[in-house]
Image (cartoon, grey):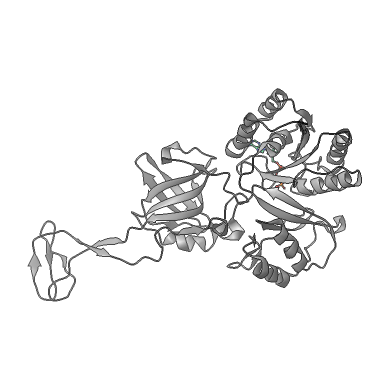
């Protein structure tokens, strides 16, 4: 049997807040590959890593390409290195590109490394040592921090995945307002949802496919199936040139960043988790519009936050009451608060304890400490001071999930439309 040998290419950390995007760089490389008869095996991959990574520009994404390791592989390597040299935003202190080439199969230890890059922090030294141990050819530009993400991007297995079609602008238009016909985006969403998703935040009238940064991306449409992206692209009208477009296979919207925590006390800062807890207090809103409450279990408690950008989601959260058992998904950030991405109601506390109702129909009042209740209307008294349980109606529903709006959602968060 002939064993097929592949060359895996990882690229990361080429962009800055002022411009570029590693996906655009990848699409330029893919064009040059095509011109030279170098074919990709599978889609190019856009892999989102630890959402809390310190030096990320935006969404902490790295790119991976896979080609046959044949007589064109040398040419491919030089195309990649030349394009990274040419297009990276070297002037930015925080842009430290890293490129890696790896020949052969992705091993179990490489997969473990990739999950570590999603769950934890990895240093440049660790990444370099690991890369060398598995035989990667490593190229560091400046500090070369990008090798952390590059190795992870080629190594991550994608059991669940989505696709994103990215359309790119003419460089003359970088930094100017994007000329996208918003009505056509609404039409596209209507005709292609739920095959495509995250297009529009209806509650905020927010066009989510349109980035707000000066990068080369004109728009990005996300989907479960590549064919739907082609349809979506045909519907969206733009009034500026699209110089190129490319479909990436991604781990976006898969909840890959979420680890199951069996106890609150097992969770660590800068980790993302799914955990079950009981609501301890009524959610309260503070100046700035952030909403907080605590959940607890036998092991401890943690403050949960629904921040101002989550807009109407805070209204939903405000309906929680002490005693509700919920499963929360999110991450523990800088402030050590559990930043909620979504929650599921496990069991609502639909019981409220009230003073008993008198035979005459009037609700009784306390007759004083340890003196039971009395009726102000007919004067009747009862000795027991025990309040009585009353079933109350709740606007939240048992077993239902509630999620943050599209405008406030993380790249990795799995939307409910992908869960059911
Ligand atoms: P964009 O989304 O526009 O591509 P970005 O948010 O991906 O930008 P990068 O420029 O890629 O930002 O910078 C992220 C940096 O963090 C990269 O150098 C990457 O190697 C590194 N990194 C990724 N994951 C981790 C991790 N788990 N620990 C430490 N560093 C990481």
Using the image as rendered, state which of residue 376 and residue 229 is in the foreground.
229
Residue 189 point in image, percent of width and height? 66, 67
**Measured from the top left, where is residue 81 in percent x and y?**
85, 36
Question: Ligand 1 lies in which image quarter?
Answer: top right
**Apparent side of residue 366 relative to residue 353 in the rendered image (left or right):** left
Going 68% across and 48% down the picture, which residue do you hit? 250
The quarter of the picture where the N terminus appears is: top right
Answer left or right for 327 relative to 5: left
Q: Is residue 27 above or below residue 394?
A: above
Furthest residue in direction right, as rendered: 36
Give residue 236's quadrant in the image. Answer: bottom right
Q: Residue 281, can we see it?
A: yes
* Location of residue 296 (image quadrant): top left
Q: Is residue 21 visible?
A: no
The residue sitting at 60% across, 42% down in the picture is 52
- The correct choice, above or below, for 314 with respect to 111 in the image is below
Q: Residue at x 91, y 46 (%)?
A: 35
Looking at the picture, does residue 89 appear above or below residue 394?
Answer: above
Of residue 285 and residue 22, the one placed in the foreground of this image is 22
């Amino acid at each position: 049997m002939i064993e097929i040998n592949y060359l895996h290419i990882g690229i990361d950390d080429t962009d800055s807040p002022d411009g570029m995007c590693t996906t655009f760089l990848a699409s330029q490389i893919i064009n040059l590959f095509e011109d030279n008869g170098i074919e990709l095996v599978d889609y190019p991959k856009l892999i989102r890593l630890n959402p809390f990574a310190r030096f990320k520009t935006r969404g902490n994404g790295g790119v991976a390409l896979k080609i046959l390791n044949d007589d064109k592989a040398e040419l491919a390597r030089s195309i990649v290195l030349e394009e990274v040299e040419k297009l990276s935003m070297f002037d930015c202190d925080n842009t430290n590109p890293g490129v890696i080439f790896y020949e052969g199969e992705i091993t179990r230890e490489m997969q473990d490394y990739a999950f570590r890059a999603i769950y934890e922090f990895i240093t440049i030294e660790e990444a370099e040592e690991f890369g060398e141990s598995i035989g990667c050819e490593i190229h560091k530009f400046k500090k070369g921090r990008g090798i952390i993400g590059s190795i992870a991007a080629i190594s991550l297995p994608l059991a669940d995945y989505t696709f994103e079609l990215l359309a790119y602008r003419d460089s003359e238009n970088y930094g100017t307002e994007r000329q996208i016909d918003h009505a056509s985006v609404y039409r596209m969403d209507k005709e292609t949802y739920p095959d495509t998703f995250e297009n529009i935040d209806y509650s905020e009238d927010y066009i989510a496919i349109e980035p707000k940064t000066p990068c080369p991306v004109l728009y990005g449409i996300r989907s479960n199936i590549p064919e739907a992206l082609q349809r979506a692209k045909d519907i969206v009208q733009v009034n500026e040139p699209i110089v190129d477009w490319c479909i990436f296979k991604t781990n976006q919207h898969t909840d890959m960043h979420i680890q199951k925590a069996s106890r609150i006390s097992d969770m660590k800062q800068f980790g993302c988790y799914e955990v079950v807890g009981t609501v301890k207090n009524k959610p309260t809103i503070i100046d700035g519009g952030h909403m907080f409450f605590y959940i607890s279990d036998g092991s401890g408690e943690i403050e949960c936050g629904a921040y101002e950008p989550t807009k109407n989601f805070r209204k939903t959260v405000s309906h929680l009451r002490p005693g509700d058992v919920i499963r929360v998904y999110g991450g523990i950030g800088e402030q050590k608060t559990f930043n909620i991405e979504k929650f599921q109601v496990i069991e609502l506390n639909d019981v409220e304890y009230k003073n008993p109702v008198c035979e005459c129909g009037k609700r009784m009042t306390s007759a004083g400490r340890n003196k039971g209740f009395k009726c102000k209307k007919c004067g009747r008294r009862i000795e027991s001071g025990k309040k009585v349980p009353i079933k109350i109606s709740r606007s939240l529903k048992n077993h239902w999930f509630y999620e943050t709006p599209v405008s406030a959602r993380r790249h990795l968060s799995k939307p409910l439309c992908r869960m059911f």
